[in-house]
Image: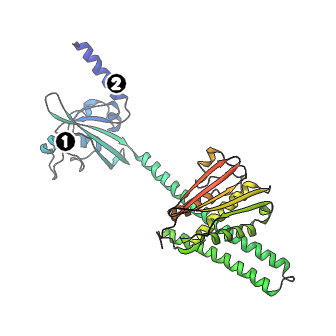
């Protein structure tokens, strides 16, 4: 059995622990009276000593109110100052939590109030109230939300610029070529180049339409298309946009048969352009090889795109689909190409994976062949 000195010592220890908590903690009885409180409660209530707060109504001492707070769990619904004993007796764990706006020391503060039901030695009902001032936390949350919104806006704007760069670069190169050699070309050749410009303008227009559709959360439009044709178009586009990078590259195409199914051909073409450009930049003007293989696996069309540009480390492979992640030198990439590619595959209900081995990088794309959109 513990003697009275040991019990007293433990009570002192417990009181010291409660006093060390830098948030007001109070014990409130069935008449709204403050029975016990820790030291920081005195500061919160702007009181000089416990004699000014003990035995006084909590709503008066804490919040300078003339009647119980509207959110109090034992408050009577009318203007009565007496508590609802039925509500008090029905209080039971777990704790109840409220977030309220109160004026503290002349300043509006957001408070998080936690009420814990408690039964005394003589079976009397109490509740412990803990008060947390969360104004700064809320302000920080709102600030973080603003930053997240700005980051999302930055991602969207950078993504738009990244996607528009391909057709705009094509238009610029074609116009420069025409301007430099306008006297050498016949009318048919000029018309062909104007058709290329028109195609690039249409692609830019479609990118803007895609962005508007994304804002309206519309389903992607699909058509019955040839995956071989989409690959060939993407390859011709990168050869036109990046002739120097393509100069020493060998292309290998492995396909037993063409596969036709419903997908958005323009988006898949953009996906392939991003992957091809990524491979070309990895090879970096050296002698290299890009292989494209098409397989049919159950109800999926599988595309395997592989290059021998040096491979990527495990650490990087876990991040390459993250927005803004780039392993290129400063100014050489936005870090959005593979993130956008990943989004395009997800829009089609497919999967994209990356593997690296023996200085090679392999992207495996699986696209469902069943018509799920349209």
| Residue 305 location (% of width, % of height) | 65, 58
| Residue 117 location (% of width, % of height) | 22, 38
Q: Earlier in the sequence, mark 1 or mark 2?
A: 2
Mark 2 lies on a secondary structure that is: helix
**Residue carrying label 2:** 16
The N terminus lies in quadrant: top left
Q: Report, in whole angstroms, how far the alpha carbon at label 1 lies from the one at label 2.
A: 28 Å
**Residue carrying label 1:** 91
Mark 1 lies on a secondary structure that is: loop
Q: Which residue is nearer to you in this view: 357 or 269?
A: 357
Q: Which residue is nearer to you in this view: 50 or 332?
A: 332
Residue occupying image coordinates x 25% and y 47%: 65
Residue 156 visible, this angle: yes
Residue occupying image coordinates x 33% and y 40%: 131
The answer to whether the residues at label 1 and label 2 have Cβ atoms under 8 Å apart is: no
Left or right: residue 139 versus residue 243 is left
Q: Which residue is nearer to you in this view: 93 or 295?
A: 295
Instruction: Place residue 16 in its image quadrant.
Output: top left
Residue occupying the far front of the picture: 256
| Residue 81 location (% of width, % of height) | 16, 46
Query: Residue 132, labelled with which disc?
Result: none
Q: How is the image coloured?
A: rainbow
Instruction: Place residue 255 in its image quadrant.
Output: bottom right
Residue occupying image coordinates x 64% and y 54%: 362
Q: Which residue is nearer to you in this view: 370 or 76?
A: 370
Residue occupying image coordinates x 13% and y 28%: 122
Q: Nearer the viewer, mark 1 or mark 2?
A: 1
| On screen, residue 86 above or below 119 | below
Residue 107 visible, this angle: no
| On screen, residue 18 above or below 302 | above
| Residue 126 location (% of width, % of height) | 19, 36
């Amino acid at each position: 059995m513990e003697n009275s000195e040991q019990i007293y010592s433990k009570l002192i220890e417990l009181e010291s622990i409660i006093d060390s908590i830098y948030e007001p903690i109070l014990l409130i009885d069935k008449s709204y009276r403050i029975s016990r409180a820790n030291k920081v409660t005195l500061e919160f209530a702007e009181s000089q000593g416990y004699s000014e707060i003990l035995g006084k109504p909590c709503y008066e001492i804490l919040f300078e109110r003339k009647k119980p707070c509207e959110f109090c769990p034992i408050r009577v619904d009318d203007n009565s100052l007496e508590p609802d004993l039925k509500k008090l007796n029905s209080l039971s764990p777990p704790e109840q939590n409220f977030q309220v706006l109160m004026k503290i020391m002349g300043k509006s503060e957001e408070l998080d109030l936690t009420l814990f039901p408690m039964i005394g030695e003589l079976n009397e009902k109490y509740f412990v109230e803990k008060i947390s001032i969360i104004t700064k936390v809320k302000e920080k949350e709102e600030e973080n939300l603003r930053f997240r919104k700005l980051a999302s806006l930055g991602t969207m704007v950078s993504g738009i610029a990244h996607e528009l760069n391909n057709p705009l670069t094509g238009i610029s190169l074609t116009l420069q070529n025409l301007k430099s050699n306008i006297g050498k070309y016949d009318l048919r050749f000029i018309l062909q180049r104007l058709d290329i410009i028109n195609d690039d303008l249409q692609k830019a227009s479609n990118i803007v339409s895609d962005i508007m559709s994304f804002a309206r959360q519309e389903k992607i439009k699909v058509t019955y298309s040839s995956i071989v044709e989409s690959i060939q178009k993407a390859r011709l586009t990168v050869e036109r946009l990046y002739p120097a990078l393509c100069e020493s590259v060998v292309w290998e195409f492995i396909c037993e048969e063409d596969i036709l199914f419903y997908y958005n051909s323009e988006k898949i073409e953009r996906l392939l352009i991003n992957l091809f450009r990524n491979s070309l930049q990895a090879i970096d003007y050296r002698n290299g090889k890009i292989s494209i293989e098409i397989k049919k696996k159950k109800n999926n069309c599988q595309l395997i795109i592989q290059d021998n540009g040096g491979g990527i480390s495990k650490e990087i492979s876990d991040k390459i689909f993250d927005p803004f992640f780039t392993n290129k030198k400063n100014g050489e990439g936005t870090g959005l190409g593979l993130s956008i590619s990943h989004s395009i595959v997800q829009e089609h209900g497919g999967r994209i994976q990356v593997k690296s081995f023996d200085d090679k990088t392999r992207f495996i794309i699986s696209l469902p062949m069943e018509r799920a959109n349209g």
